[in-house]
Amino acid sequence: QVQLVESGGGLVQGGGSLRLSCAASGSIFRDDAMGWYRQAPGKQRELVATITSGNTNYADSVKGRFTISRDNARKTVFLQMNSLKPEDTAVYYCYANINYGLGYKDYWGQGTQVTVSS
């Protein structure tokens, strides 16, 4: 079992920055995918960024503004968000996809609210 705990959300003015952290407990390894999704009110949950074995992937809407990174020794993934826009307002969820050999399993954090004022 893996547990994910996010921190770092809050209220920020447009153009500002926030850094989200997600600490994992349990068996998680460098080759397991971790990342961030977000869900705005009335919208579906969407991919923000993922990182696997050092390879990163970003949604077009955040490219050039957000940076995902990972500390494998601390089992922690970060999301540095710069140049924030009101449309970035959402609940941000940490995500992990664990390879158990015979299959994969998804884990989610409880979510952290990010609110960007105009």
Image: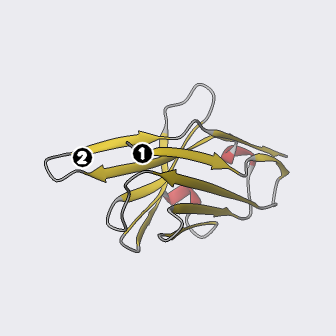
Residue 64, percent from left and from top: 60, 70
Residue 23, percent from left and from top: 57, 54
Res. 94 mark? none
Residue 76, percent from left and from top: 54, 61
Residue type beneath disc 2: Tyr
Q: Is residue 114 above or below residue 19?
A: above
Res. 104 mark? 2
Tell me what residue is drawn at x 50 percent, y 53 percent.
Answer: 24
Residue type beneath disc 1: Val
How was this image coloured? Answer: secondary structure
Tell me what residue is drawn at x 41 percent, y 41 percent.
Answer: 107
Residue 108 vs residue 118: left or right? left
Residue 75 vs residue 27: left or right? right
Q: Which residue is mark 1?
A: 2
Q: Is residue 106 above or below residue 75?
A: above
Q: Is residue 68 above or below residue 96?
A: below
Spot the residue most to the top. Answer: 42
Residue 73, percent from left and from top: 49, 71
Residue 108 vs residue 31: left or right? right
Tell me what residue is drawn at x 61 percent, y 61 percent.
Answer: 79
Element assignment for label 2: strand
- Gap in angstroms between the C-alphas marked 1 and 2: 12 Å
Cβ atoms at labels 1 and 2 below 8 Å apart: no
Q: Quadrant of the N terminus?
A: top left
Image quarter for residue 54?
bottom left
* Sequence-earlier tag: 1 or 2: 1
Image quarter for residue 90?
top right
Element assignment for label 1: loop
User: How many numbered marks, from 0 up?
Assistant: 2
